Image: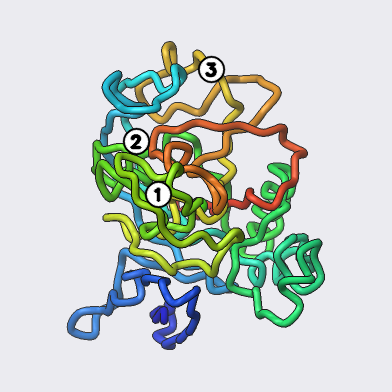
Amino acid sequence: MRTLLTATGVIVLVASVVGGIGLYCQLGAKQPKDGKKDEDEITNSVDMVFVRIPKGKFLMGSPQSEAQRMPDEFQHEVAITRPFWLGAYEVTQRQYELVMGTNPSYFSATGGGKARFARKDTSEYPVERVSWNDALAFCKKLSTKEKKTYRLPTEAEWEYACRAGSTTPFHSGKTFTSVLANINGLKYASYGTAEAGPFHRNPVPIGEYKPNAFNLCDMHGNVQEWCADWHGLEYYKISPKGDPQGPDKGTERVVRGGAWASSAKTCRSAARHRLAPDERNYSTGFRVVMEIK
Ligand SMILES: [Ca+2]
């Protein structure tokens, strides 16, 4: 069960059970103290919850000692020079449909996976089969609707937010299995341990697992998430220290965090992946940044 306190103070209860093992997102446990508004959390017109990510410095990428790292995870210091507001959750099918008028998701009653999902309410599942271009169109339309600016996070913002101060391969520590996030549950897919776990073989409703220290849910797994940047294999060897924006040009956009079928190594905080900007698949969704001047 998930309990969200919206900006208007309305308690929204969302009950969901995922194979009996779903954990929970502690965001819902955040309550204003002494009747004061929680100034670190905002809910918008389509119930998207945003948390304030403080500015700061961090080591982006992975150390040479990190098991199963890839060469493009070149470790370097990055400064995020301004606080920003990031979606606490992946954008849901319901939110996407409210803004765009369509639900392209495979795992829905009308999608390609309808044989398994015809009788399920998938409105709180993350939207998938959205391209990078679709995600930008969503940001543009939501920006117009709310007279604010929404955008995708940069790759550096995404990793900074995922790590939330951690320096381990995962924000939760050195080892990882599908008990901690919706990823591949087969024994070979775990990291730093040989334990198997649940394997749902599809996305699950947002917020079923314990969040990171910034109160962000599903940064590891569920759906992998589009970032704003072009992908550059060598970019972080020459990137500016402050607020890197990615290469000026490229052919593929960055996706981060791994998905429901991914091995844990693919979901590490430093793991970089990329797709063509018009690619749509049932493992890829997004979360957005709300700009507040
Ligand atoms: Ca995710």
Residue 78 in view: no
The residues tagged by marks 2 and 3 sit, at their Cα atoms, a distance apart of: 21 Å
x and y percent of residue 229 in the render? 57, 31
- Considering only vertical position in the picture, is 126 above or below 45? above
Q: Type of residue at label 2?
A: Ile
| Residue ID at (33%, 21%) | 75
| Residue ID at (40%, 19%) | 240
Query: Of label 1 and label 3, which has the lower sequence position?
Result: 1
Question: In this figure, which residue is indicated by the disc labeled 2?
Answer: 80
Question: In this figure, which residue is indicated by the disc labeled 1?
Answer: 84
Circle 1 SS class: strand
**Closest to the observer: 95 or 245?**
95
Question: In this figure, which residue is indicated by the disc labeled 3?
Answer: 233
> Going by the image, does 59 lie left or right of 121?
left
Circle 3 SS class: loop
**Are the residues tagged 2 and 3 within 8 Å (C-beta)?**
no
Q: Quadrant of residue 228?
A: top right
**Are the residues tagged 1 and 3 within 8 Å (C-beta)?**
no
